[in-house]
Amino acid sequence: MKKIISLLVLVGLSFSCSESFFDLKPQGRASLEQLSNKNGVGALLIGAYSLMDGVGAGNTGRQSTISNYVFGGISSDDAVKGTDAGDQPEQSFIEQYNWLSDNTYFLGKWWHSYDGVARCNEVIQIVSSAAVKDMTEAEKTQVIAEARFLRAHYHFEAKKMWNKVPFIDEKVYVASDPNSTKVPNTEDIWPKIEADFDFAAKNLPAVQAQKGRATQWAAKSYLAKAMIFQKKWAAAKTLLEDVLKNSGKKLVANYHDNYRTTGNNNSESIFEVQFSVNDGTNGNNGNAGDNLNWPYSATAPGRGCCGFYQPSHNLVNAFKTENGLPMIGAAADGTADTYNKVDLPNDQGITASTAFTLDKSIPVDPRLDWTVGRRGVNFLDWGPMPGSTWIRDQAYAGPFTGKKWMYYLSEENSTTHSTSKRNVNNNYRLLKLSHVILWLAECEVELGNLAAAEGYVNQIRLRAKNGSVQDASVTYQIEAYPAGTFAAKGADYARNAVRMEQRLEFAMEGHRFFDLVRWGIAEKVLNKYAAEESVPGTEPSGRKFNKRGYMAGKVFTSKNNYFPIPQDEILNSQKDGKPTLTQNTGY
């Protein structure tokens, strides 16, 4: 004890003559001084980009993954939660329209959106300061343009989720004042999102030296998407035509080239979220936010976990064709469609040990088997999908598995995977030329130009017709709409055809729910879906099988067009004893 006291006295004497001993720099973080230069600004901007995949904002990553598989997929008629009944009940509540403001998935998505916004604001604040002396004004402007593109993206994600959300820019955000961002959510933030995308479009180059950075074409496409969400058809059309005619982008020959690692950053891509593996980081790289969405088998892609995010019967049936065309009617909300009256043959309720031969004679759109794994059909180069051995609980979640994010067996190596076979460098294509073409078709329908809309839809259908197919033994049948079909059948038929084309082209990519809401048809479509998906199905042979009985009695109402604002965030928004955030109607 005496030795310890003596040592403390000596230490005190050694430093008593100087107060600088107590003036310590923070360890493990960069100072403002260190960041106020070209390298520091660049690092901060990369940090803002790094959240694009949805991982790294203090949540599980699944809650905010860029694929939006929970909010855009299982909330819609495209997909079910998958796995088994007891796994991730928060997702089950979302799937079944039982939305409570304390669901951790809503909180995680909010955290991510505004963490991304905060990172963008820090970039803009620092690069705009006089302290940064080693950058030209042109270099600073481009950094600000990239940061504003990203800031608009993060706000867009929040806007389509909750509608009533605050816009936080670099003038509002003060890092040293936790109350600075406690602002009301009563203002419509679309104009500010548009302003950020517009600034980016005017100040970004047409081509970036580094893949993954935003370009003027990405900004124009995203600005057009924001306008489409607001039904600004003419303004969106002008932007989209510019992208289509002048960006140099073109459709790839084969549809599935957009969904494999060898197709990253291809000629159709306008903006991709870059996934890297084996890059020196630990764990959360590749498509880590989607690491549950793999077949439940060690013999399948992903090698054994976890069975989430399975396609619905409704989605699979939507790919059936008649004379090469979708089985749709002349009602814009899809209520006259006939594709779901009889189910496509499948192995629901048939065990893996039971002999099964899939009836492949029924004509389907070839995009079905690039989107959905089904028993008896080739699964990329893994051979025919074996059935329920790849499904965690077929009786609960159905016989299908998603396919677009899967990898070829021949590509299973260290350049495409991390140690986990479920972290893959297959980029997420956020904006593709196919989006631009089908948004143009949508604009033309709404502007009354049905022939032009038909032409755009046919570009997409002809690509699917002329491209490669997954399994030569399946009867694939897809044709362009005969000239004059849209005009002859009317605007509502044309509108429905464009909407169906968007569903088929981008199925399981996390867009469907948000599309249904912006079209104003979510309530009708999803109530019809819940009613039909919950009762036994019938194949053309007359065989009946159970579907998703847990959807019986589930009701989607108008309040469900937007999710509840997380209760924790409302509580945390208190300023002067009152919350600044207001909950969405009905919650």
Image (cartoon, rainbow, N blue to C red):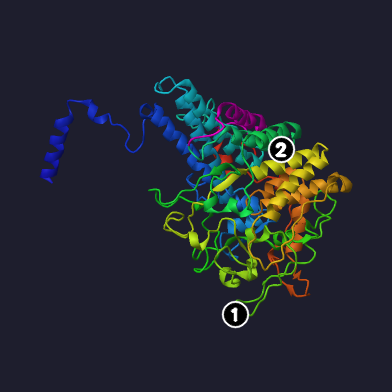
Residue 195: horizontal and vertical position, in percent?
A: 62, 28
Task: Give the extent of the magenta segment.
Answer: 181-209
Residue that sits furthest to the bottom in the current view: 354
What's under tag 2, amino acid-wise?
Ile
Tell me which residue sits at (89%, 47%) in the image.
488
Residue 352: horizontal and vertical position, in percent?
A: 60, 76
Tell me which residue sits at (71%, 34%) in the image.
236
What's under tag 1, amino acid-wise?
Ser
For label 2, the residue is 228
Lateral position of residue 380 relative to residue 523, left or right: left
Q: Which mark is residue 353?
A: 1
Vertical order, 66 against 231 (above or below): below
Residue that sits furthest to the right in the current view: 488
Q: In terms of secondary structure, where does tag 1 sit?
A: loop
Lateral position of residue 562 relative to residue 258, left or right: right
> How many neighbours does mark 1 have within 10 angstroms: few (below 14), some (14-19), or many (20 or more)?
few
